[in-house]
Amino acid sequence: MKYLLFFILLTRFLSAEELQLDNLLKQYEDSESLYKKTKKESAGFLLIYSRSDLEKMQAFHLRDVLKTIRLFNMQINQMGAIGILKSGSGKAAMPPIKLYIDDFELSTVLQRNMFDMYGNMDIYFVDHIEIYQGGSSIAFGNEVGSMVIRLYSKDPKRENSSSAQFSVDNKSGASLRAVDAGTMGEYNYLFYANAEKSNYDTYRRNNQELSRDGNQYQAHFKIAKDDDFVIEVDGILNKTDIFNGFGSAPTGGRTTRAYGYISATKYFPKNLEISISATQEVKEVYNTDANASIGSSIGLSSSSLHMNLHSNTYKSSIKKKIIKNNNDLLIGAEVQKKVFSVKSYDGFNQSPTFGPDELNIFMIYLEDLYNINKNNLLTFSAKLDRYENNFNKNSNEYSLRLGYIGLLNDTWKSKIFAVRRYVYPTMVQTSFSPPAYKINPDLEAADIDMLGGELEYKTDKNRLVFGVAYKETDNAIAMDKVQKMYINKNSTVYLHRYYLRAEHYFDIDNKIIIEGFKAFVDTYGSPGNGGLLQIFNTIGKFDIYNELVYRDGIALDYGMGDFKIDKGYDYTLSISYELSKHIKLKAKGENLLDKAIETPIDPQGLVQVPAIERRGILTMEYTF
């Protein structure tokens, strides 16, 4: 009996020791998380999705993160692609949101952001995601955006392994993704590839079936040498059914969207770096319509359309950081060249009108971080940009940013940013547009003044954040429903927004996040209120994630009468089990209540589509 008692006590002691060792290991891994080395607190109001978060969320696609971002609404456009709007904005708005993979911005020539191309991208190769709101830092370079989303790829030196995932869902969709990362002598490399077939619910409009089923292929390659160079190559290809298309009764058609880039950065002594890059973007549409209504909104009529657009961006930049005493000064310059061409535009009797098809941008900027003391930081940024197009329409634009970050005491921290920036019109507004509205080569840049602040209370177990932003836009770019083109508004547009976020950490593996926001705008074009609930749990070898995304309902009018969008409740449940050191089994249910917020894709609001459909997904992951 005494031997049995001794054995029980020894077993319990060893189990406790193992649990304590496991907790210490997790705490060490958390302290060494990559996001703690890449995040920039001075760059804006920061949201971080850590690797642990993304894995528990089973965030297979970027859309799984986009739908949770406060003060924004994720939607589906008429072609079935992902879009994202500021809360309260109309569907014609094009927010200048910047999307990065590591230090490369995925820039588009024709549009304001890349989400119709990359919104549904697979993110299996991504380690963590940082989101900067509140007039993001000028130090990121490129054209200034209202929000920056940075995807950081997995660190080859940390990974040093190969892994693959295979997923199937209840709509007969499937996805295979794989990543191989490691070192070869003094070089680090990462290779990732994905092939995916996606099926969605079908809808009907004017007795025609609307489908957006499709296939997606993606690859990413990166090779680097520490403190020497980085070379990245990325490509994505989407082939989907036309969905609603440009008419009112689509009888068929396909869309092809492809994008690729190559980027190289060379690092020199004394914090100097030089980068060059090139991108190519292709968008091709085949659209047939039973009512010959393609182009009807601008006085045209066609039963078919074939459109093929090609565009390229070329960039070169130089940056240097100077650190002296309490100052951290960054100075930089960049040159961009954007060109596009229409390879085909068949289906109409008359030729389309074109605006400028080439744009050159010259940029110089600086950002200074001044440490008043260890608890107080001032940041100042200035950027001057010159735009020159081949219609001899040139302009000079500037951006300014002044910020303060202060630790009031051990638990309270504040951030304040005052921003003056602009939004330059895109080529899809000035140069070439699909058969839905007219171009306006005379568009001017919109001028924006913004003041934002954030107050944070933080302890070992709790974090509470309250944020507020006020924005005025002069010369705002907006769609004129009468003229059927984008114009500069004569009046000032006002916006103010508030959010409250609460986080409670039970331990290293278990936490809960509750967030709510409200936006006030002159005219609502999408839901202005929303909320988020996230619960992350680990129980033994099980990871469990619960998520509820709320968006308020709204009444809209697209020119053919009022209609209503109901409130949205998007509930997601993810469960994974670690079968062994090599195998993980995963199950995920998306939009389980089938009540996610919907987007109207027709002027009457008769066809409304959720950005995330109800879906069940089973996944197996194998690590070699």
Image (cartoon, rainbow, N blue to C red):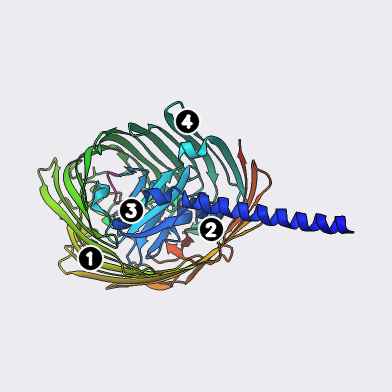
Mark number for residue 183? 4
Q: Disc 2 residue type?
A: Glu
Q: Give the alpha-carbon distance from disc 2 to disc 4, as whole Å.
A: 40 Å
Between disc 2 and disc 4, whose residue precedes? 4
Q: Main secondary structure of the magenta part?
A: loop
- State how many labels appear: 4
Residue identified by numbered label 2? 613
Front tag of 4 and 1:
4
- Seen from this angle, which residue lies furthest front? 2
Q: Which residues are magenta?
A: 108-114
CA gap, disc 3 to disc 2? 35 Å
Q: Please tell me whether mark 3 sits on a helix, a strand or a loop.
A: loop
Question: In the image, which disc is placed on residue 40?
Answer: 3
Residue at x 27%, y 35% (from the top left corner): 275
In space, the residues marked 1 and 2 are separated at their CA atoms by: 36 Å
Sequence-wise, the earlier of marks 3 and 2 is 3
Disc 4 and disc 1: Cα gap in Å? 45 Å
Q: Is residue 167 left or right of residue 482?
A: right
- Element on which disc 1 rests: strand
Determine whether the residue tagged by mark 4 lies in a helix, strand or loop: strand
Look at label 4 and name its amino acid.
Thr
Mark 4 or mark 1: name the one nearer the start of the chain. Answer: 4
Give the amino acid at mark 1: Met
Q: Which residue carries the number 1 mark?
A: 450
State yes or no: discs 4 and 1 in contact (Cβ < 8 Å).
no
The type of residue carrying mark 3 is Lys
Q: Is residue 604 magenta?
A: no
Task: Give whichever of discs 3 and 1 has the lower sequence position.
Answer: 3
Disc 4 and disc 3: Cα gap in Å?
27 Å
Q: Position of residue 329 (x, y in %)?
A: 20, 48
Which mark is on residue 601?
none
